[in-house]
Amino acid sequence: MSTRVGLTLAVLFANLAGLSAQTVVRAPARTLSGVVQDSATGQPVGFAQLTIMGTDQQVFTSVSGRFTLRNVAPGKANLRIQQIGYRVARICLAVAGG
């Protein structure tokens, strides 16, 4: 049985180092998009669940690992990423106001 190391989130198509990072999502659109990848292989992770903690906002990645979260509120956003077979990843984002 193989053990999967974890998930890496590529926010706005830029790779973030580690499981905790800061990124700014610019207004006015306040849309967060990117790709979830396996941190060991770099392969996209399809059907991973992304949730902005403390809200009802969530989305699943496509088969190619891509996602888009729309109407993200300005301020601090704690993103939780989970998929069966992976450790849960948490990333703190700073969302610019508009």
Image (cartoon, rainbow, N blue to C red):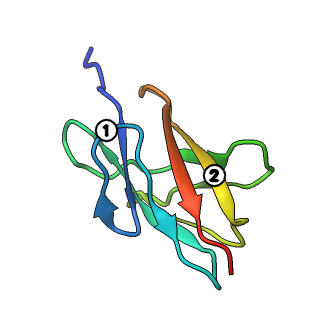
Q: Is residue 80 above or below residue 75?
A: above
Residue at image location 34% in from the left, 68% down from the top: 13
Rounded to the nearest angstrom, the CA distance separating label 2 from label 1 is 17 Å
Please name whichever residue, 34 or 83, is drawn nearer the observer in this view of the structure.
Answer: 34
Q: Is residue 60 above or below residue 39?
A: below
Instruction: Return the residue found at the far bottom.
Output: 28
Q: Position of residue 37 (x, y in %)?
A: 33, 49
Q: Position of residue 74 (x, y in %)?
A: 69, 66
Q: Position of residue 10 (x, y in %)?
A: 36, 57
Q: In this rendering, would 25 be left or right of 70?
A: left
Q: In this rendering, would 6 be left or right of 81?
A: left
**How many residues crowd around disc 1 within 10 Å: few (fewer than 14), some, or many (20 or more)?**
some
Please name whichever residue, 72 or 22, is drawn nearer the observer in this view of the structure.
Answer: 22
Q: Which residue is mark 1?
A: 18
Please name whichever residue, 84 or 77, is drawn nearer the observer in this view of the structure.
Answer: 77
Residue at image location 49% in from the left, 66% down from the top: 24
Please name whichever residue, 50 or 22, is drawn nearer the observer in this view of the structure.
Answer: 22
Three-letter residue code for mark 2: Ala
Image quadrant in which the C terminus is located: bottom right
Q: In this rendering, would 95 be left or right of 44?
A: right
Q: Which residue is mark 2?
A: 77
Q: In this rendering, would 66 be left or right of 96?
A: left
Three-letter residue code for mark 1: Gly
Which type of secondary structure does the marked residue at label 1 adopt? Answer: loop
